[in-house]
Image (cartoon, rainbow, N blue to C red):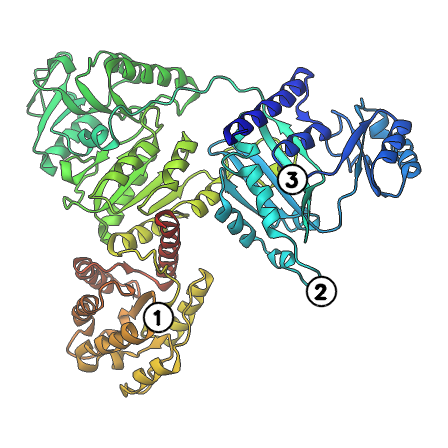
Amino acid sequence: MTIQNTQALRGLRGKTLISQAREKGRLSLDEADGKALLADFGIRVPRSRLAADAAQAAAIAGELDGPFVVKVVSPEILHKSDAGGVALRLPDAAAVRVAVEEMAQKPLIAAATLDGWLVEEMAPAGREMVIGGYRDPQFGPMLMVGLGGIFVEVLRDVAFRICPIDAADAEAMLGELKGRALLKGARGEAGVDEAALIEVMLRIGGADGLLMTHEADIAELDLNPVIVSATGAVAVDARVILSAPAGAEPAVPVLQDSAGETFRPLFEPRTVAVLGASTKDVGIANTFIRRMKAFGFAGSLYPIHPTAPEIEGLKAYASFAATPEPVDYAYIAVGAERIPNILAEAGGRCRIAQVISSGFGEVEEGKALQEALVEGARKGGVRVLGPNCLGTYSPRGGLTFPSDAPREVGTIGIVSQSGGLTTDIIKRGEWRGLRFSGAVTIGNSADVKPHELVAYYLDDPQTRAIGLYLEDVKQGRAFFEMLKQARKPIVILKGGRSNLGRLAAASHTGALAGDEKGWSALQEQTPAVLVSTVDEFIDLLLALQHFDLHPERPTRAVTLFGNGGGSSVLGTDAFAAVELDVAPYPPEVRERLEAMKLPPGTSVANPIDTPVRTLQEKDGFVAGEILDIVYGQAHPDAVLMHLNLSAFVGRGSVDPIDNLFTVIEHTRAKWPGGAHLALALRTDGSAALDDRRRHYREKARAIGVPVFDEIPAAAKALAGVGHLERRLRAVTG
């Protein structure tokens, strides 16, 4: 029988078990059916049979090998142990009969409708594990593994991944467990067969595993415990919670063209229409026209108005049909109720419309109107961004919605579900040195979904790295599958990670699966990093703008070089907190640095602590000699130079920091492909020093060096870089 036929047969048998349970009005499979489902996927389970009463249970025990376990089976009793419905280590048939008779008298069991009693052979001794699964509302099936017993009940020592997983994912999950050493053997105990455990994980969560095969039907799955010993793994308990019968899934729009062709009119529009501008008032659409003019848009601007002959000095047109040319991009800020018909009547003469107006799916009473908007867009052949957003910024296309945005074309692509936050990212990012290939606000994402714009940036040669602000990823499975194959780094600032709402947990898996688990798993399975604040978002994107990533040697070893002993100590702690190493140099490197005979007070152990007096040597060019030894002998993955700017005030006639940029430029040219180099420039908060730091930032940007305000911010960014390098190595092989 072929593999495909085997998989199809497994799916069919499982569907039969699930259908039979649903026909009986059950919300779960009983344990016998749950174990039959596991066995169908090649997972070892104890031999067992279902008995109707104590006498039959004793008879079954006589046909199996003891010792035995007996469990109550009832659709009304999900947690059998809590009801007193489990008896262990029963030596023979007589003990089985007595156990059934005694359990039948328990109050919760006596009051329930029973299917019978499961009699099974006890599994051999081993380490208790828990393997579970659940259907995440955004990403679909997810797998959990953890140490069983007290480790899951109290310590919550578990790891999660989005399905399907592969063997490397399974190994990484085990590596996250604090109790991993117990699997290797501890205090004289033998180690367990980890390969067998990984095989069970793959049969549950792999591409052809149980969770993917029955994705639509299983809400929660709990195998607790799975007994793993030196000779294999056996699932001794199975709890399968069924999902509510699924309705029809909404149709997913299929891109008829490549992402590049679909969204080129957005990022490089030749014709822009504006709906909502007025001859009387200065509304948001009028402001948009004025900003486009000030930004230097070189294409054609077409105000659309039913009666006005002219708006903002531009000839106005009554409709899309009346414009001299088809419209690449339309900015729509009219009453929400008018928009579905406007889109429906576009007649293929508008490629992309951005709906600024609110009053749609973000409020309960607007959900039907949002559906009408999407339907109208389909009819009119328009792709829609929004509604409930602010606009798109594309310096290469002369398109903007913020005022005074930088005109320089950069390499960072942004997709955001918040218009106001995007303005903040653009403006704050500009001051920090970020430059953008584009920034798109998508609001409710009624039509164009985040992953479609990510696809554009992934194919866009102008974009080096992608930043996302998301509250609801919409088509999470498509998003995940795309990111798994991504060959560019992605930074995600996720809003609302704790308020999506969870299914009512009927298992350990459900109870442990908080809203953030899917996103944490996404980070571990794709070249993406989750950040918590706008500052962290900008910091990491700034590093990615300037660094050439090194997947072949992911960032871990760091040289910390600067002035201030206390800052160096605290900086070392900050790097250790994000699992990067500021480790002392080996003797041969220290000897080379000590041979420079630097001024007293200098320490070269790593951190390299250089007082102001040292950095003033040779008007600051001494730093180049130090960096030559670091790059040539120590070979770190990253170098962070940190400077307390206030310590240099009034100290000499030459500014060694200005010369430092020449040093850095020469160092990078001499050691191409060497360690990432970044700066942390600290001030005392005075206006004068903050202005000076702004001057240094511009010099750093010109030579491709990121500047951070503090050492801990740089440490977090470099840790993010290291994670992305490791994940890109996994993608590219």
Question: To which residue does mark 2 refer?
Answer: 188
Q: Nearer the viewer, residue 195 or 526?
A: 195
| Residue 452 position (above or below residue 717) | above
Tell which circle, 2 or 3, labels the residue nearer the N-terminal end: 2
Residue 154 horizontal side relative to residue 698, left or right? right
Circle 1 sits in a helix, a strand or a loop, which is it? strand
Question: To which residue does mark 1 refer?
Answer: 560
Could you say where residue 273 lies in the image, as x and y percent from the top left?
15, 23
Could you say where residue 591 lies in the image, as x and y percent from the top left?
34, 85
Judged by depth in the image, the label closer to the viewer, 2 or 3, is 2
CA distance separating discs 2 and 3: 30 Å
Tell which circle, 1 or 2, labels the residue nearer the N-terminal end: 2
Question: To which residue does mark 3 refer?
Answer: 508
The residue carrying pointer 1 sits among few (fewer than 14), some (14 to 19) or many (20 or more) residues within 10 Å by Cα, namely many
Q: Quadrant of the N terminus?
A: top right
| Residue 41 position (above or below residue 26) | below
- Residue 720: name its quadrant: bottom left
Judged by depth in the image, the label closer to the viewer, 1 or 2, is 2
Name the amino acid, label 2: Gly
Q: Nearer the viewer, residue 528 or 497?
A: 528
Taking the spot 47% from the left edge, 45% from the top edge, the residue there is: 520
Could you say where residue 199 lies in the image, as x and y percent from the top left?
58, 44
| Residue 542 position (above or below residue 603) | above
Asked whether the beta carbons under mark 2 and mark 3 sit within 8 Å of each other, the answer is no
Circle 2 sits in a helix, a strand or a loop, which is it? loop
Judged by depth in the image, the label closer to the viewer, 3 or 1, is 3
Labels in figure, total = 3
